Image: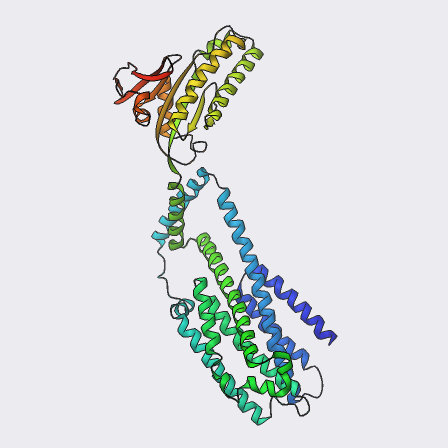
Amino acid sequence: NTILAFSVVGGVLTQIVLSAFSRSLRVAGSISLAQGVFMVALALNRAPITAGLLTEAVSIGIILGTLFFVAGTMAATFMGLADMQRWESRRKRMSRHQRIGVLLDLKDRVSVASLRGEPANRESWTDRVSRNLFGWAFSLGFGFDMLFVIAVSLLVRSKVVIMAPDNQSVAILFLYSISFLGVFGANLLVGYCGGRYLRMLLAALVLTASGSSFLFWADHPTHLLLRMGMGNQVGSVRDMFLQGLAISLVISNVGWLAAYVQRKTDRIWKLQRGDASVLNEEIQRLENSLLRDQSRKCVVAVDVVGSTRMKANADMLVSEWCFREYQQIVTQCVEDEGGQVVNTAGDGVVASFEDPASALEAAAAVRDRLLVFNARGNRLSEPFQVRIGIDSAEVQGNLAEVQFSQLIDTAAHIEAVTPAGAIGVSQSFMALMPDERATQHGYSADGNPIFLMRESGSALWAEPLPTSS
């Protein structure tokens, strides 16, 4: 018994380690089969070998081998889940630039795969079972129960194989081992091929119900167990049915989870191998995720007029401090209006806004705050004067990641032709503003009207910025 106990513990640990390392149910099944045979041989390591001892050894091998397989399945499943979590975590951490790079790489691999040619996908046996899941569930439950009744009835009547003359527990153990093996295999198959979770649960219920079809027969092995003294351990027939249903649901859930992880890990493996169908699915997923980021943004570009001259005529440290103060003022104005600074290259600042009114308020606040700074805090000999350009358009992604967007270029172009101290805006931006705050008229520049926003009392109005067409 001590050797058997150590063998069981060692077998479970070996099963868990090897199954977790392989992430494969096939490996888990092969190892559990080998360990079941080993347990049978270990149990037979006694003399003399009788029919009762052989029956007991086979029963132990079946039960322990099945339990080993459960342990291996759980280990492979949880390691597969861990791999999936790491894969998804890496994918979520990718920047937009990295996702685009992966997308372009996948398209190159699809081109290579199309030139190489892919074999036609054949329907697997799991797909065939899944297509007619409830038929399989009923057939397995009814068929196993019928075979169980026939086999056990014949064996019990013969009293050659499973009956020990003075020990009925051997027969009970054998009956349980056969029943457990059939229930486990059928429910694992239903769970593995179940597909959607609710569909799998319904199929497991059908399997259990059809597998209890002969319970009403007085000579059913379940009633035999009760007559052999197992009633105190397992309860009534109703209790045994409920216990079987609970076991069925647990095993089916294990199979469903294993299939879910297996599909995900197979997909990752096919993606790495270059399977054309999986590559196309991943391309579609990436394109959808990139296009989902599309939204309308307003970009405000701010630049200091004559910054080179201002720096050349000032002490280096004074210049550094003043321009840092200027950047902090602009950043504060942007954040106060709910915007986001996306670029601060040189003495220019580019900010993004969701709301056009907030963009215009931030631009006006920059001018006002710089007037105060020039009067009270500027240590340079020249005042800070800025040009501000604003544009609005549909963009994809966060502008902090997409700094090559045409929207930013357009806002910078508007800023470059705007006079010092003024705010230049595009026609698309003006279209978003209330009528009382802007008038849509003006000259065109490169076919696109540019408007100059100026203050008039407490209101803002727009007049055309003269530029050459």
Viewed as shown, does residue 164 lie left or right of 370?
A: right
Residue visible at 62% across and 90% down? 163
Q: Is residue 144 visible?
A: yes
Looking at the picture, tell me which residue is in the foreground, 21 or 161.
161
Q: Is residue 441 above or below residue 1?
A: above
Where is residue 113 shown, x and y percent of the image? 37, 52
Q: Would residue 193 be seen by someone viewing this image from the given angle? A: no
**How far across and down, in percent of the image, does residue 229 sit?**
64, 86
Residue 290 on image: x %, y %: 40, 41
The outermost residue toward the bottom is 158
Q: Residue at x 51, y 12 (%)?
A: 373
376 sits left or right of 466 in the view:
right
- Give the residue drawn at x 55%, y 15%: 320
**45 lies left or right of 343:** right
| Quadrant containing the N terminus in the rendered view | bottom right
Q: Is residue 143 above or below residue 326?
A: below
Instruction: Name the colouring of the figure.
Output: rainbow
Most extreme residue toward the right is 2
- Give the residue drawn at x 46%, y 74%: 207
From the top left corner, tell me how far across and down residue 336 is, in percent.
Answer: 48, 25
Residues 263 and 111: in front is 263
Q: Quadrant of residue 465?
A: top left
Specify the quadrant that holds the C terminus: top left
Decide which of 454, 168 is in the foreground and name it: 454
In this rendered view, identify the residue nearer to me: 424 or 307: 424
- Res 237 → quadrant: bottom right
User: Total number of numbered labels?
Assistant: 0
